[in-house]
Image (cartoon, rainbow, N blue to C red):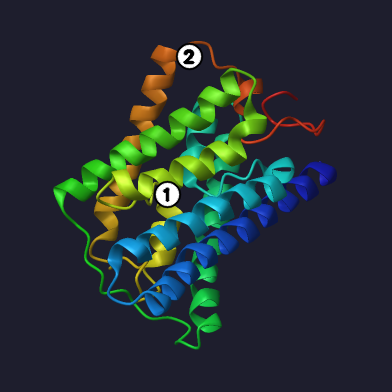
Amino acid sequence: MLLKRRELLRRLFAEYLGSLLLAAIVIGSGIAAQSLSPHAVGLELFENAAATGVGLFVLILTFGSISGAHFNPVISFVDAMFGGMSWGTAWSYLTAQVAGCASGAVLANLMYSRSAVSISMNHRATLAHGLSEVVATAGLVLVIFALAKTGRSSLAPAAVGAYIACAYFFTSSTSFANPAIVVGRMFSNTFAGISPSSAPLFVGAEVVGGVVGFALLKVLYPGVTPSQASRVTVAHDGLASEGTS
C-alpha cells in the first residue's frame, strides 16, 4: 500500500510539473511573440503554435513513462472511462493538472518581469469558439486513444504536438482543448490569456468534446482495453499500472 501511494505521488508530481511547464511554454511563448512581432497577429500565432507543439513533444517524452503525460483532465477522465485508471486517480490528476497550469502562468509572468498574477481581459466566448473547442478536444482524444488502440503510443509525443500546433490554426479558438490550461491562462493578461467570463464556455465545450471523442472511439476502434488505455501517450516501460494490475 505504501509503495502504491508513493508511486501515485510520483505520478501526480510529474503531472503537476509537466502541466506547469506546459502553461509556461504556452503563455511565455505568447508573451515573447507579442514582444518580438508586435501587431502581426498571424506571425504571433505561428510562433506561439510552434513553441507549444515542440514543447508538448518534449514534455510527453520527458514525463510519459512516469504519469502518462496527460496534462489534461479530459484525457485523464476518458482514460478512466476506458478503465485505464481509477476514477479516484483521475480526480487526483485533475487537481495536479490545474494547480500546475496555474503555477505555470505565474512563472511565465515572472519570467517576463510582469505581475505574478494578472487576470486576462481577452474575451473569447462565442458560439464559434465553443464549437471549435468541441472539435479540437474530440480530435485530440481521437488521436491519442487511436494510437493506444493500435499499439503506436510511442508516436504520441510527435502526433500530439503536431495536432495541437495544427489546431491552433484550423480552429477559431486556437485550440485550448484542455480545461486545466483554460484555468491557467486566466491568470495572464497577455496574448495567450482568456478572461474568466469566457472560461466556462471553453471548459464546457471541452467536456463535450471529450464525450464526443470517446463516442467516436467506441465506433471506430471498438474494444479499447484498460491495458491499452493505460498506455495512452507512451510505450509501456514495465511499470505496473492500474489498468493492468
Q: In the shown orientation, is residue 42 left or right of residue 6? A: left
Quick check: can you spot residue 16?
yes
- Does residue 185 sit above or below 161 in this rendering? below
Pick whichever, 51 or 62, lies toward us: 51
Residue drawn 68% across the image and 54% down it: 14
Crowding near the residue tagged with mark 1, few <14, some 14–19, many ≥20 C-alpha atoms within 10 Å: many
Crowding near the residue tagged with mark 2, few <14, some 14–19, many ≥20 C-alpha atoms within 10 Å: some
Pick whichever, 144 or 83, lies toward us: 144
Q: Amino acid at mark 1?
A: Asn
Quick check: can you spot residue 231?
no
Residue drawn 55% across the image and 17% down it: 224
Name the residue that disc number 1 marks.
178
Name the residue that disc number 2 marks.
221
Q: Position of residue 137 (x, y in %)?
A: 38, 39
Residue drawn 44% across the image and 36% down it: 140
Q: Position of residue 23 (x, y in %)?
A: 51, 63
Q: Earlier in the sequence, mark 1 or mark 2?
A: 1
- Does residue 81 sit above or below 5 in this rendering? above
Q: Position of residue 12 (x, y in %)?
A: 66, 52
Rendered-image quadrant of the N terminus: top right
SS label for mark 1: loop
The answer to which image quadrant residue 124 occupies is bottom left
Residue drawn 74% across the image and 41% down it: 65
The answer to which image quadrant residue 21 occupies is bottom right
Pick whichever, 68 or 159, lies toward us: 159
The answer to which image quadrant residue 150 occupies is top right
Between the C-alphas of marks 1 and 2, the distance is: 23 Å
Q: Position of residue 54 (x, y in %)?
A: 56, 52
Residue 141 - label:
none
